[in-house]
Amino acid sequence: MLGITMAILLQVSAVGDTTADYSSAFKDASETGKPMLVLVGTDWCPACVTMKQSIIPRLQRAGRLSGVVYTEVDADAQPRIAHRIMSGGGYPQLALYRKTKDGWRRQVLIGVQSESTIQTLVDRAVAAQEADSDKLEVLPISQ
């Protein structure tokens, strides 16, 4: 039993706490102008659990989410925030917000997504953000 507990602790410490709470992520994205990637899901949804425990952590460990601010929203614990982020029904939803000259834009992927699909979404957002960074003034977005 102790061996299993130690293995879990080592795994958690190796990955680190790379998921900011929504308020902190929101503040960070507002201040830095970085795109914000939000995973909205629930604990009872198998696809959400796959995204939270397998797909996203692999991308994080590989450093592939370093260009965005990443956070998760539990739709059961934070229904108001989840409702504002989500595009219709269905879990999980991965929303990416990016600052443009016309304001913040949102792209949403619904359902479980592959690492390559998420990577493409993030890469395009980061590249577009970098291309537009000279033209943008970073302003806070309302919560």
Image (tube, rainbow, N blue to C red):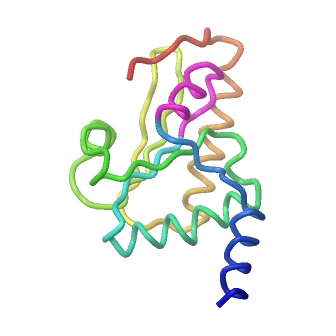
Residue 33 at x, y percent in the picture: 61, 23
Q: Is the residue 79 above or below the residue 45 in the image?
A: above
For image coordinates 74% across by 62% down, the residue present is 13
Residue 81 at x, y percent in the picture: 31, 38
Q: Is the residue 51 above or below the residue 84 in the image?
A: below
Residue 58 at x, y percent in the picture: 67, 67
Residue 20 at x, y percent in the picture: 57, 43
Residue 69 image-quadrant placement = top right
Residue farthest front in this picture: 2
Q: Is the residue 3 above or below the residue 131 in the image?
A: below
For image coordinates 57% across by 72% down, the residue present is 54
Residue 10 image-quadrant placement = bottom right
Residue 32 image-quadrant placement = top right
Q: Work out which quarter of the rendered image holds the C terminus and state it.
A: top left
Q: 40 or 76: nearer the eye?
A: 76
In the image: residue 113, left or right of residue 87: right
For image coordinates 56% across by 49% down, the residue present is 121
Q: Is residue 32 magenta?
A: yes
In the image: residue 33, left or right of residue 22: right
Secondary structure of the magenta portion, mostly? Answer: helix
Q: Is residue 128 magenta?
A: no
Q: Is the residue 102 above or below the residue 5 in the image?
A: above
Q: Work out which quarter of the rendered image holds the N terminus and state it.
A: bottom right
The magenta region covers 23-36
For image coordinates 49% across by 66% down, the residue present is 51
